[in-house]
Amino acid sequence: MTSENENLTSRARPRSSHKESAVSQPLLQIRDLRVAFSVGKKDREVLHGVDLDVFPGETVAIVGESGSGKSTTAAAVIDLLPGTGKVTSGSILLDGVDLTAANRRQMESIRGRDIGYVPQDPMSNLNPVWSIGFQVEEAVRANGLASTRKQTRERAIEVLKQAGLSDAERRMHQFPHQFSGGMRQRALIGIGLAADPKLLIADEPTSALDVTVQRVILDHLASLTREKGTSVLFITHDLGLAAERADRIVVMNQGEIVESGPSRIILESPQHPYTQRLVAAAPSIASQRIQSVVERRGLEHADEVLDAEPVVEVRDLVKDYKIRSGGFRSEPFRAVDQVSFAIPRGKTLALVGESGSGKSTVAKMVLQLEKPTSGSVLVDGADTSGMSRKEVFDLRSRMQPVFQDPYGSLDPLRSIGALIAEPLRVHGVGDEKSRRERVFELLEQVSLPREVAWRYPNELSGGQRQRIAIARALALKPSIVVLDEAVSALDVLVQDQILRLLADLQSELDLTYLFITHDLAVVRVAADMVCVMEQGRVVEQGTVDEIFTTPAQDYTKRLLAAIPGADIPLGGAR
Amino acid sequence: MSSNSSHYVAPVKADELVVDQLRLSEKKSNLWLDAWRDLRRRPMFWVSIVLCLFIIVIAVAPNLFTSVAPSGGACQLSKSNGGPEPGHPLGFTLLGCDIWSRVVHGTSVSMSVGVLATVISTVIGLIMGALAGFYGGFLDSLLSRVGDIFFTIPYIVAAVVVMSVLAEQKNEFVLALAIGGFSWASTARIARAEVLRVKQSDYVTASIAIGLSRFRTLITHVIPNSMAPVIVVTTLGLGTAIVAESTLSFLGVGLGGVSWGADISQAQTSIRTAPLSLFWPSLALTISVLAFITLGELLRDAVDPKSRAQR
């Protein structure tokens, strides 16, 4: 270890409060940072000169869409750029020490001790073959926080307790698969903060978790870092979340900072057109805006929406699964319990719930991909449970799905044209020539050029693939479209675009949507009616207005409160 | 941006305001097109593919390469283990047959048995694996157990038994069946694992929701997307099947005609006096097996985008 580095690690930690820090030196100072990935013999620059300051005790959020360079910036700070990435110019100063000049040994001692890191995916960032305790102890040992076994163990328990796992002693022996997503993320936060680092980098720490869990975890993280005066560099795609959690927001797009400033200012009076659009499109914020419109024009009630006869009706739907419980025994598990709802023609019903609520199972039963244990699904008044194979086949042409994963819902070996034409071919609609015409027509409806028909799915972005999936679903001119988390995996602006497209298509083609989502904020902008599900049951249903303004159930209230940025004052954009 | 509360706004650029811009490259791209583009740039690919094609040409038309018959009247005992002479570039075997001619004609036996055996094992393996993986449940248990049984039988031993029992009616097809019929279990396992992975994809659910039957879905979407590892195993398996044919001929339970394995077996008795009669058929065997295995390895790397990125 060099003397400079010795100096860096042994120096007393500034524990200044936020107010004092306004005049002090920045803890992290990034200047003109450029990062490139080498592809073959060429270098492709992905960060084009990033300037960023994080002051002691401050929380700074980098907001951007996928590919904006927000995670690359974070990775460059802790020298963990993936693959062939390297810093090509610029400096990263942590307490005056240039991290770009540090060697591997120095970086190892800086990581963990000076910079803590909480990764994105709690599912894959814990090693499944070691116990939680072992992995926390490993972090404690690696940072030289304890010398004896006993001390290490005690410190590890302390770390987990701090992270909010109150029964840490018992949990030490458990393995990652015995932890829920939220508990795993707590363990990872514990590991990240084990050595009391000066800076914590949290890369989308809660985007894989349910909103209610997200809220609890972020509250806990905030109180921990406030207590210790830790600076936080928070990476997120959610502007509402960033505004709620950070002192300052840095908006990135295509490897550059487009705007940065205090959270409130960014949200209330964004100056850059890109930020303005981002603020306008963020569902959490947009839903609030609608809220204010509602207050002016009054509530829309269920009887007003429900005047038309229902196209899809679900009555007392139940689905039991058998769960193996060792040996040959199995226990029934009720995934869906007495679910009933109806969707009038041309309307959108949103089925909302967190993971494990049974919402996707309901969608599968409506789509006739799973058989209900009891209860019935009626389409245009006809009960589907007694239908013959031929009738189900005909029903499929009137009811089409769009799935979540834009990378998995299109066969990668088929050209786009063949994929869109497949439903027509299967149902024997038209001849080769008319089908081709229909493909072009559909591509036009989803605003994609004709030449895409000869391309393959992996050449398109997630949003474009989702357009293809929509075009394919519309090929047979269905009256019902089941959207299973269809926009959940998309970036905000793209999500906004797809939601508009769906709304346009709905009014143009008189479509009825069953919209499955975990995101209440999206519901606000996309649906007419809402069904809130918890553990297989419908806990509350009504019009969007009713649910959002006068939620009756505690669970619904909790869900609404957990929408990030719900309590932020409205911005000036539109 | 030096102060804590400053508000920085970057200059506006025209192109950054287009949401989700369509960026198509000049070239179309999917798994196989990308693999082909990757392979095309590799010298080893061209070396092995040219070698493989050359071997196949020799196998199909041996008479283009030699006019001397490999056995029968063309062999002169007086030339036993003789050295090279004009018209006989590699010399003579123990029985006085032309080595070059025997190597050339041996190719056709090795290749036809090798290719046939590989096709048989791939077809059986793919069908068993795909059905087991796609339908699951009882069928999976049944087919997987059958596969396990075949996995435990060393296919060489099984083929020796089959060839001894069927000594009367042995021909290329029977030999290929004996090898391929006992070596499909690993292909089946790979196909099953891949089908299990592919069947989870949303596009499989989507095609069922369109109205495609489960079987049609298996044929049109699941199997084509599961082919990559199977094709790699097939190419690697071709090398092993060629070795298997030679091994059986070496052990004396082959077809009994002209074969590299039989020649190697025969030449070992005079290895001290005439090592070259052992060397040439061994070299031919090594080169052809290496050519096919190299092709398989390159193909494996090419269809795996992860390993492609690392190189």
Image (spheres, rainbow, N blue to C red):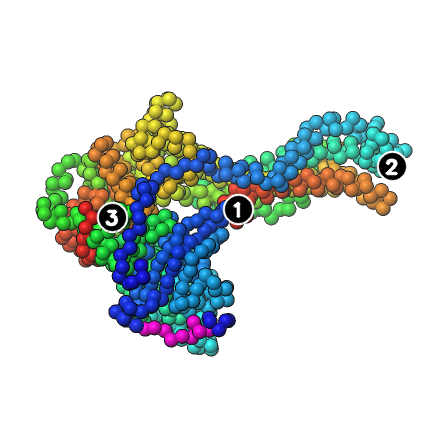
Residue shown at 46% from the left, 54% from the top: A88
> Which contiguous range is marked in magenta?
A6-15
The amino acid type of the residue labelled 3 equals Gln
| Residue B71 in picture, x, y percent from top left | 80, 30
Crowd class of label 3 (few under 14; some 14 to 19; many from 20; radius 10 Å): some
Label tally = 3
- Within the image, what quadrant is residue B278 found in? top right
The span from disc 3 to disc 2 (Cα, nearest Å) is 90 Å
Q: Secondary structure at mark 2?
A: loop
Asked whether the viewer can see residue A398, the reply is no
Crowd class of label 1 (few under 14; some 14 to 19; many from 20; radius 10 Å): few
According to the image, label 2 marks what residue? B82
Q: Secondary structure at mark 3?
A: helix
Closest to the observer: A105 or B35?
Answer: A105
Asked whether, in this view, residue B282 is left or right of residue A342, the answer is right
Crowd class of label 2 (few under 14; some 14 to 19; many from 20; radius 10 Å): many
The amino acid type of the residue labelled 1 equals Lys
Closest to the observer: B166 or A32?
Answer: A32
The amino acid type of the residue labelled 2 equals Gly
According to the image, label 3 marks what residue? A276
Q: Secondary structure at mark 1?
A: loop
